[in-house]
Amino acid sequence: MWLAFSLDGCTLAVTEANPAHGPEVQLWDGVNQDQLWSVRIDDPAITVARQLAFSPDGRYIAVTTLPEGVWLIDVVQPAVVRQIQAEPVGSIAFSLDGSRLSVGGYTIKTYDTTTWELVHEQTFPVSEVPTVTEPSTLTNTFRLDSMRAVISPDGQWLAAPAADPASGSDFFVGRYPLRQPITLRWLADDRRVRVLSGSPRSLDKLLVGPDSRWLIDVGLSEIRVWRVEE
């Protein structure tokens, strides 16, 4: 399952990686534990719904799907109101003010949520070498999921991998870089302001403090906290 609480903690969005259920998003009352509604993404090419993110005001849920796609669900209607992009995605995050949505995949993209125009794009090469643990019919999901991206709460900067974390022929003992470097970029002009050494071997998650001054990168073997200077 993938889970996401609304910012006020009152509702919980849920998806299940179960093709039998299809690409369904459920909304639950976090207090009474009752299911409020479920919405299916009506696209025959989509098999399952995955990562979730609430907009800060709780009005919308952004959801990723396999084998590709990012969708926007209106919580009030409830209904799918937009396909944000068709490309496959590994992570998804709103800025705290709701003005930006960042999706991390082989191409990390950041959108203006008012116009849905692209304001930042960073592309990684796609390896042609499959791994033995991945279905041959799907995109390299392990590497896709390693393309984490996070927007600062003030919406000013983006943290994302600085290079493609190449995987080897085996999922568990594949060849990893010694560290996964992380790039900080100002979204206003796409200027790279810092490259951090990052976590050993692999980057699992990126988090940012509510004051936009602290970046946390979670790796396989340690957690590192960075002070983001003005």
Image (spheres, rainbow, N blue to C red):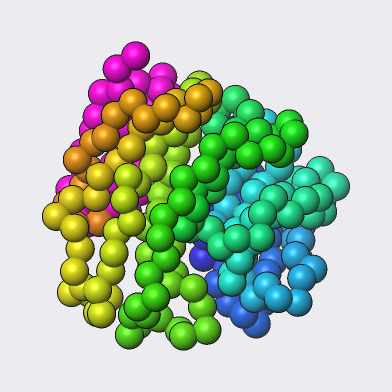
Say if the magenta span includes residue 215.
yes
Which image quadrant is residue 111 in? top right
75 and 191: which is toward the camera:
191
Q: Position of residue 15 (x, y in %)?
A: 60, 63
Q: Relative to residue 14, is residue 34 drawn left or right?
A: right
Quarter of the figure that contains the C terminus: top left
- State the residue at coordinates (19%, 58%): 177
Q: Quadrant of residue 131?
A: bottom left
Q: Position of residue 32 (x, y in %)?
A: 65, 48
- In front of the other: 23 or 67: 67
In the image, what residue occupies the spot 35% across and 21% down? 213
Q: Which residues are magenta?
A: 203-230
Q: Residue 34 occupies which quadrant of the picture? A: bottom right
Examine the rendering and report whether any part of residue 58 can be seen. no
Residue at coordinates 33% horizontally, 26% vertically from top-left? 193
Residue 161 position within the rendered picture, expressed as x and y whole percent measured from the top left: 34, 46
| 148 over 68 or under it: above or below | above
Queried whether the magenta region covers residue 217, the answer comes back as yes
Q: Position of residue 103 (x, y in %)?
A: 54, 48
